[in-house]
Image (cartoon, helix red, strand yellow):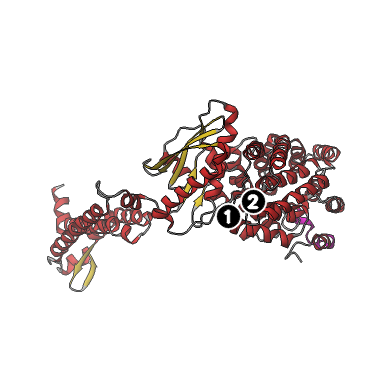
Amino acid sequence: MKEFFAELKRRNVYKVAVAYGVVAWLLIQIATQVFPFFEIPNWAVRLVVLLVVIGFPIALMIAWAFESTPEGIKRTAVADAAREHSRGKAWIYIVIVGAFLSIGVFFLGRYTAGNATPRHDASPARTEAATATPQKSIAVLPLLNESGDPHDEYFSDGLSEELIAALAQINGLKVIGRSSSFRFKDRHEEPKAIGEKLGVSTLLEGTVRKQDDRVRIVAELINAADGIELWTRTFDRELKDIFAVQEEIARAVAESLKVTLLGSQDRPAQRGAPSNVEAHNAYLQGHFHFQRRNLEDYRKAVGYFDQAIQLDPDYALACAERSEAWTFIGDLTGQREPAWSKARSDAERAVAIAPALAEARAALGWVRFFVDWKFTEGLSELKRAKEFSPSNPTANDLLARVILYLGRLDEAERQARHAVELDPLSVIAQGNLARVLLFAGKLDEADAAARKAAELQPASASSHRWQVVAAVLRGDRATALREAQLEPDEGYRRFELALAQQIQGDRQAADAALADLIANGRDQLAYQIAEVYAVRGEKDKAFEWLQIAFDEHDTGTLTLLVDPLLRGLRDDSRYKNLLAKLGLPGSS
């Protein structure tokens, strides 16, 4: 061993190790202290450290095998034979210079980091500016109902949503949508955890106490990163002043955030709110049922919206939301024209009352596109809705849908991802993203988004539907059949089972599943029957049912341009003729 260590010394391995260590420490100090100053990503720092560690044994092996001579780098054996072994002392200077540079960078980093840390005696505005994340963002958590009556839950929920809508009017402010914020209604999590899950820097929370004709609201604005209260306000008013209170809270939030985040003027909120408190109360109950997103609750919602509009005929927001409810009722029941005629009338009325109300423009745009098949006009109205309220989740979601129908897949994906960013825990936004990715041919990503939607709401129909279609396109028999059996909607379960059975290789089971779909779904699922025939390769039958769907104004026909299940029909002249009759912009 003595000879081995002597040989290490003779070959300068010790010197290389010391010099390498000093230089390596210098490089690591530069990476850790200087990189953050230039906002170089953390992965670059980790890469430098990793390369330094990997390089150490390599440097030692090179030092053992090679020597520096006056004639250049030579193998040790050759250098020994020529007796040209280097005795220079340059390595000492390398060590000394490297050590001084390393120490200098280390203390420079400590000094600048110390100065960047806000002092305890700093003003709240300075401290907040130093600690706030660059992103201009807020989530309104559901206000807690402290009225003592659980039947007043709709009131506190409705107030929370109206605050979300009011803040969404502020340009440059990211406002998280209702679906995501309301996930934390009954959960007790730290502000930091909520902020990270929703991707926001501030939270608005509070309580509502409604008794007789008075209401007391306590609102609190919190910095999500550390849970520190930025301000708290108490509003004790008569119930008739509830709209003024909402404006006061929104204004207080905007003024506070402008100091630290916005630096821009907020746009006046134009909510189409009524002057009648009873009308507002009826609207809130209708909205409560509307958000449950099923046929029975849509019908209940319409009943409450009727009450609200009877009490205040100029209640634009109630008209807009009743319009949207009627479109879904018509589509889900198959009794399209009676419901859609009411949807059309309500949307036009809402825009006439409040032309700058985002929900009114979105309702009209959706009716024009989805119901009337006036595609250019519908797209224009939805874009206007987004201009009036960039963070409005309804406008963003509906816009993503119609852009997809038009075949603009890249734009549709950007819009769908933006909708998810605004409402990351929304099953509707995640399901729509899954559909967009599926139609774009990104099957794995579509499956992941659909599974995310299923995690958020296991009974969600859209999650299973898109998982089934993705599995069918991949030829994944087991997944297709399993997810089809989990579909909660009876009608779509028949459709998905017909698709899943088709790729199982059992012709008898596939025929039986298709027969069941036709027997029970011919009035509502004509387009889906056409899709199954297309997957089976029976083109004549597929076009027969596509024509039925077109004649019945089946909304599934809107996906004709981009539907991957119809890929086998696209070279047929009948497909091109049907697409021309549909008249989607850019499809010719």
Identify the residue at horizontal 75%, vertical 44% (top origin). 326
Tag of residue 359: 2
The amino acid type of the residue labelled 2 equals Glu
Decide if residue 130 is on the left or right side of residue 479: left
Magenta-drawn segment: 566-576
At 47% across and 43% down in the image, what residue appears?
A: 197
Q: Quadrant of residue 329?
A: top right
Q: Quadrant of the C terminus?
A: bottom right
Q: Residues within 10 Å of mark 2 (few under 14, many from 20)?
A: many
Name the quadrant containing residue 287: top right
Q: Position of residue 529 (x, y in %)?
A: 81, 46
x and y, in percent, of residue 490 in the image = 75, 35
Count of labels shown?
2
From what the image shows, is residue 31 above or below residue 446? below
Rendered image quadrant of residue 105: bottom left
Identify the mark nearer the N-term, 1 or 2.
2
Q: Are marks 1 and 2 in contact (CB under 8 Å)?
A: no
**Circle 1 crowding by C-alpha within 10 Å: few under 14, some 14–19, many from 20:** many
Q: Tag 1: residue type? A: Ser
Tell me: 518 left or right of 33: right
- Residue 367 position within the rendered picture, expressed as x and y whole percent measured from the top left: 74, 53
Seen in the picture, residue 65 relative to 248 is either above or below; the reply is below
Q: Please name the residue that numbered disc 1 is placed on.
A: 389
Of the pair 45 and 250, the residue shown nearer to us: 250
